[in-house]
């Protein structure tokens, strides 16, 4: 077996708030191989962004990693100090954020911002870095990069800004790119452009991607493997085909059925009853059991763990041998 | 079925950038000559990307914004030049559900007051009758009487949207304009709200104008669909026609761009180049000509007419005969 590039083991991240301490991530384990795209899906508040921030060690003040390990290329990132982390971030591990409007600095030109990454990590002169920035913008197919580097973020459209973000993230050719909802703020036709661009760049550069999104369509187009998250836990993980065609976790099943599709025309939409529990008032046992149509007694008492059903398919559920309800 | 609403060559321009004497130098043509009818009891979907004018159109129909020109007929009565009192009467029959359930409810009011307010404004019923109506509405949208005394911040996004729906239904309107009602919600909550909207429609014989950027949601809920681009309708047809055999190149590109949540659903994608042009200076001729994959010589010169190209299937493109 190939050695994983990134290995997250039993990660637990807690948030300390005025109302109390709650785990945003509870016992998260997954691995990422070189060159692979892993989709991390789930609804808002399920902990997918916190997973990304934990790996980048960019958690806000209230967040603490209390257990587990994150091995990147054989080294535990949780043992690194801030100075060492800074050398890794941007060079070997990069991240792009959802909101391209707010993640660029409005008072610096595009060129300055892309060149900054290159100057810091490659110790080049400003002139050399700007030349490389032009190349990076060319790579993300921004027209007329020589003149674009002198422009400010507000002069660019949403799609162009997201391209700039991608150029910044890939400028130092990182091994892993974490993309947190990279197309959510964009229109469909622009989203299609960005997805196309990311697929092309991945092919060329061989970057491994952790793709965080709530859009199962985007996952189906980009990811090879998918981890579904619910209330701070991974509830199912498998290759993309298994997730879409042979999902075993009731939450995954419900999520897939809730999307309006051609087959459902004229029929009632499937509904997952209720809503996501408040993190401070998590139900006993399986956190999905109050909403689950297949709940059995055991679910109410003991939380299920993530178990293998095949070599690559992991499920967290007590009742996987159920009969599927229509 | 008779037409509940007729919109004829409706325009809404916003002035931007004052010149030296305070005259606007430019105008954003948010809605630029739109014509359609909405039949009683149907769901009329309006889709388009951001900035295409779909929300402005919704607001102009409701007269939350004054139209620049054009006609709006509701039940065959021209409502384009109504007095304040006339408008107030009109809004008994026309209500709106907004996109953001966090911003559209007053955080200082209890839920019962929020839902009651339309009844108070229109002077309907005694206090006791209003109370009963509020409870009835809460039940109708799937909440219960224990929620009445709470404030909006105590509710989740989906529940807040239910409150917004209850408020819109308080006056028994005929037409409800749903402006991106599920865009801010998660998938599992989205399906709950969509089902609710459909139940309410058959129960109360409502007519919906459903505005959204999400083509799958519009496909699910609408009977007829209009596709907008830069202030104009590019194509309008029955849902099955527009999704099964789109005629306009923009509709085709838009449909091919939706990521489908299925593996092996790989299709040929029509990738549009470039961005949506600035609505303050839309391209000459056909608005879509700058991004159109099948653009021809005359497209940038002459604006195509929006006409019926097949039975009940309208489109604005020179290439469709």
Image (cartoon, helix red, strand yellow):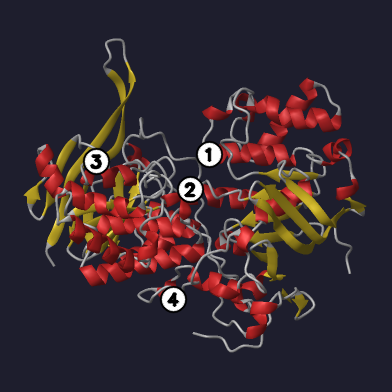
Q: CA distance from mark 2 to mark 1?
A: 9 Å
Tell me if A308 is positioned left or right of A257 in this view.
right
B317 relative to B189 in the view: left or right = left
Q: How many marks?
A: 4
Is A236 in front, or is B22? Answer: A236
Q: Helix, strand, or loop for circle 4?
A: helix
**Which numbered disc, 2 or 1, marks the residue that appears first in the sequence?**
1
Q: CA distance from mark 4 to mark 2?
A: 25 Å
Image quadrant occupied by the N terminus of chain B: bottom left
The numbered disc on residue B64 is: 3
Residue at the far left: name it.
B77
- State the residue position of label 4: A263
Chain of the residue displaying label 3: B
Q: Do marks 3 and 1 share a chain?
A: no
Residue B148 x %, y %: 35, 58
Secondary structure category for the residue under label 1: helix
Instruction: Find numbered disc 3 in the image and state the secondary structure of the residue it sits on.
Output: loop
Rendered residue at 20%/53% (across/down): B119
Q: CA distance from mark 4 to mark 3?
A: 37 Å
Distance (Cα) linking label 1 and label 4: 33 Å
Q: Mark 4: give few (<14), some (14-19) or many (20+) Cα within 10 Å.
A: few
Q: Nearer the viewer, mark 3 or mark 1?
A: 3
Separation of marks 2 and 3 at Cα, in angstroms: 26 Å
Mark sitting earlier along the chain (1/4): 1
Q: Nearer the viewer, mark 2 or mark 3?
A: 3
Report the residue at 61% width, 71% height from top: A288
In front here: B79 or A292?
Answer: A292
Residue that badge 1 annotates: A158
Q: Residues within 10 Å of mark 3 (few under 14, many from 20)?
A: few
Residue B282 in the image: x percent, y percent?
A: 35, 34
């Amino acid at each position: 077996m190939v050695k994983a590039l990134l290995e997250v083991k039993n990660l637990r991240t807690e948030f300390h708030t005025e109302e109390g301490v709650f785990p945003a991530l509870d016992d998260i384990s997954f691995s990422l191989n070189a060159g692979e795209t892993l989709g991390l899906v789930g609804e808002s508040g399920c902990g997918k962004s916190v997973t990304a921030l934990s790996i980048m060690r960019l958690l806000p003040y209230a967040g603490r990693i209390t257990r587990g390990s994150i091995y990147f290329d054989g080294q535990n990132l949780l043992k690194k100090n801030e100075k060492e982390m800074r050398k890794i971030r941007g060079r070997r591990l990069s991240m792009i954020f959802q909101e391209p409007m707010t993640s660029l600095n409005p008072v610096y030109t595009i060129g300055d911002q892309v060149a900054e990454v290159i100057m810091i990590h490659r110790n080049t002169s400003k002139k050399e870095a700007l030349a490389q920035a032009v190349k990076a913008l060319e790579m993300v197919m921004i027209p007329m990069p020589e003149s674009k580097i002198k422009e400010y973020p507000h002069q660019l459209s949403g799609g162009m800004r997201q391209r700039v973000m991608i150029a910044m993230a890939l400028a130092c050719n990182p091994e892993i790119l974490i993309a947190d909802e990279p197309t959510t703020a964009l229109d469909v036709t622009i989203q299609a452009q960005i997805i196309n661009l990311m697929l092309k760049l991945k092919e060329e550069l061989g970057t491994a991607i952790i793709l965080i999104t709530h859009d199962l369509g985007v996952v189906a187009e980009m990811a090879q493997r998918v981890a579904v998250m619910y209330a701070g836990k991974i509830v199912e993980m498998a290759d993309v085909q298994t997730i879409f065609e042979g999902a075993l976790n009731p939450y995954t099943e419900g999520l897939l059925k809730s999307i309006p599709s051609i087959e459902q025309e004229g029929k009632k939409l499937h509904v997952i009853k209720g809503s996501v529990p408040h993190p401070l008032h998590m139900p006993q046992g399986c956190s999905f059991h109050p909403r689950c149509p297949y709940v059995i007694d055991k679910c109410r008492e003991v939380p299920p763990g993530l178990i293998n059903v095949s070599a690559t398919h992991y499920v967290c559920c007590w009742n996987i041998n159920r009969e599927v309800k229509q | 079925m008779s037409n509940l609403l007729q919109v004829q060559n409706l325009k809404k321009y916003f002035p931007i950038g004052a010149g030296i004497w305070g005259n606007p130098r430019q105008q954003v043509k948010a809605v630029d000559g739109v014509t359609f009818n909405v039949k009683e009891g149907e769901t009329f979907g309006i889709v388009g990307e951001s900035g295409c004018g779909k929300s402005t159109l919704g607001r102009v129909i409701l007269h939350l914004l004054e139209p620049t020109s054009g006609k709006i007929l509701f039940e065959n009565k021209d409502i384009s030049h109504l007095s304040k009192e006339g408008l107030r009467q009109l809004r008994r029959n026309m209500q709106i559900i907004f996109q953001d359930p966090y911003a559209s409810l007053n955080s200082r009011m209890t839920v019962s007051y929020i839902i009651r307010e339309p009844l108070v404004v229109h002077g309907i019923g005694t206090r006791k009758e209003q109370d009963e109506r509020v409870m009835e509405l809460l039940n109708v949208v799937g909440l219960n009487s224990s929620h009445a005394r709470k404030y909006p911040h105590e509710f989740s996004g989906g529940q807040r949207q239910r409150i917004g729906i209850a408020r819109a239904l308080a006056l028994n309107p005929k037409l409800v304009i749903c402006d991106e009602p599920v865009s801010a919600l998660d998938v599992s909550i989205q399906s709950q709200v969509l089902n609710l909207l459909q139940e309410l429609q058959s129960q109360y014989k409502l007519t919906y104008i459903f505005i959204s950027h999400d083509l799958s949601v519009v496909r699910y809920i609408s009977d007829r669909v209009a596709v907008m681009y830069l202030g104009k309708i590019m194509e309008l047809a029955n849902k099955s026609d527009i999704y099964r055999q789109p005629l306009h190149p923009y509709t085709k590109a838009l449909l091919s761009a939706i990521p489908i949540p299925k593996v092996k659903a790989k299709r040929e994608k029509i990738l549009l180049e470039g961005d949506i042009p600035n609505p303050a200076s839309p391209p000459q001729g056909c608005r879509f000509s700058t991004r159109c994959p099948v653009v021809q010589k005359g497209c940038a010169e002459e604006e195509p007419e929006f006409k019926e190209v097949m039975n009940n299937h309208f489109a604005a493109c020179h290439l469709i005969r």
